[in-house]
Amino acid sequence: MNPIQLAQQLRSILVRYLLTTFDVNRDGQEAELAAALKERLNRPGALVSGPFLELTPPYRTGRSLRDLCTEGVLTSALMDLPCFRYGEPIPLDAPLFVHQERAIRRLCVDQRGVVISSGTGSGKTEAFLIPILDDLLRDPTPGVRALLIYPMNALVNDQLDRLRRLLKDTPITFGRYTSELRQTEREALQRLRDPLPNEVICREEIRSGRKLPQILITNYAMLEYLLLRPQDSPLFQSGQWRFVVLDEAHTYAGAKGIEVAMLVRRLKHRLGKQPGDMRCIATSATLTDDDPQAAVSFARNLFGEDFIQDDIIAGEIIQEFVPAQVHLNSVDPAVYCDQRLTRLMEDMREGGSGTGAKVAQELYALGLIPERIAKQADHYSHVAAFLYDVLRTTPI
C-alpha cells in the first residue's frame, strides 16, 4: 500500500462527496461557482494535511524469558510449551522489552495488579499472557483462571486466534464467550474446521460443566449477561479466578467507565473476592500520558483495588536511536506516486525485477538514488542486498 497514493485517493473521495452534497450547480445556473468551489476544495491543505511519517522509536530491552525461568521468576515448564519451538509469542532467548519484564515480575513475584501503557505493537499482550500461562503451568486446577475483557468482538476474535497458536498441543483450555459462540457442539462444528481439543467451542460445554475455559475471553456487555443468566453459573462456581484483564482501558471513560467499574465489583462480589485476591490488569497505548498518579487514580476507580505508582508500567523509549545522518539525496514527494515506481515495486514483490543494475537504473531515472550509487549495483548478486545498502547509506 502506497500511503501517498492512499492519501490522495481519500482526499479525492472527500472532495467528490462534498461537491455532491453541496451541488451549487444543480439547476445548471452556477457553473462558475461550482468550478470555484471545486478549485478551493482541491487546494493543498484545504481539507486534509499530510500524510505524515511518524518514526516509532524502539523500546529498551532487558532479560529474556529463558533468563527469567532460570532466575525462578517463571516456571521452567514454560520453556516446554510447544509454541516456543516456533518462536511464539516471544523467542525464549530474545530480550524482552523492559516494560514486559517489569510487568512479569510485578505479576508473578509481587502478585500485584498492573497498568501497562506502551505503544501499539510493543508486546502488552505478552506482558500479561506470560504470567497467566506461568500460573496455569504451576497449578493446572480446572475452571476459569483468567478473564480477558475487550471492548469489541473484533479484538476478542483477534485474541482468540492468538491463543489458538499459543495453546495448541497443550492441556490449557480456553475460549471466547460472545454472541458468536454457538449453542451446541453440532452448530459449532458446522462453522469451525478442526477445532483444537482444548478450545471451548459452544455454550453447551460451559453450561453442562463438561469443559470450562481456564482462559475466558469476552466483552463487557456479554459479561453482564453471564452474571445474570443462571444457566451460565458453572463459570462462576469453579476455578480460581486470579486474573482480570481490561484491554484498551482508555476506552472505559465517562459513563462506560462507571458501568464497567460497577461490573468488575459485581464480578468480585459474585466470586466472593476481597481486594487483593485478584490481579487486575489494565492495558492501553495512551493511558498514563506522562502522569502516573492519574493512572493510579484511574485504576483504583476502575477495579476497586489499591494501586500504587510502582504498579504503573510505561514503555521506556530509546530517544537517541536515530543516528545523525547527512541527507545525500533530496527527492520530490511526487515521485512516490509515479506509476513507474509502482510497477517496479510490484515486479520486485513478484521476483521479476531483473538484475540489481536494472533496478538501479530505474531508481536513478526516477531520481530516487544518485548516479554514483546506481553505478555500484553491478557489485551485488542480489537485488535485495543492493536495496538494503541503498536504504542504509542513502537516506531519502
Image (spheres, rainbow, N blue to C red):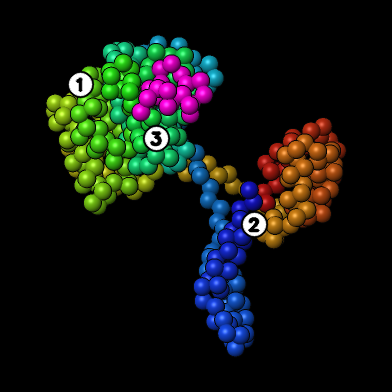
Give the CA distance from mark 3 to mark 1: 23 Å
Q: Can residue 214 be seen from the camera position used here?
A: no
Mark toward the start of the polypeptide (3 vs 2): 2
Q: Would you say the magenta stretch is mainly helix, strand or loop?
A: loop
| Magenta-colored stretch includes residue 81 | no
Q: Quadrant of residue 309?
A: top left
In this view, the residue in front, 295 or 249, is 249
Task: Report which residue position mark 2 lands on.
Answer: 5
Asked whether disc 3 touches disc 1, contact meaning CB atoms under 8 Å apart, the reply is no
Q: Secondary structure at mark 1?
A: helix
**Amino acid type, residue under disc 3 in the picture:** Glu
Q: Position of residue 243 (x, y in %)?
A: 27, 27
Which residue of the protein is positioned furthest toward the bottom in this rendering? Answer: 29
Give the CA distance from mark 3 to mark 2: 37 Å
Give the CA distance from mark 1 to mark 2: 55 Å
Q: Quadrant of residue 223?
A: top left
Q: Residues within 10 Å of mark 3 (few under 14, many from 20)?
A: few
Indicate which label's residue lies in the foreground, 3 or 2: 3
Q: Is 217 drawn above or below residue 370 in the view shown?
A: above
Q: Residues within 10 Å of mark 2 (few under 14, many from 20)?
A: some
In this view, the residue in front, 198 or 210, is 210
Q: Residues within 10 Å of mark 1 (few under 14, many from 20)?
A: few
Indicate which label's residue lies in the foreground, 1 or 2: 1
**Amino acid type, residue under disc 2 in the picture:** Gln
Q: Position of residue 123 (x, y in %)?
A: 44, 33
Task: Report which residue position mark 3 lands on.
Answer: 180
Q: Position of residue 13 (x, y in %)?
A: 58, 64
Q: Which mark is residue 237?
A: 1
In this view, the residue in front, 212 or 13, is 212
Q: Secondary structure at mark 3?
A: loop
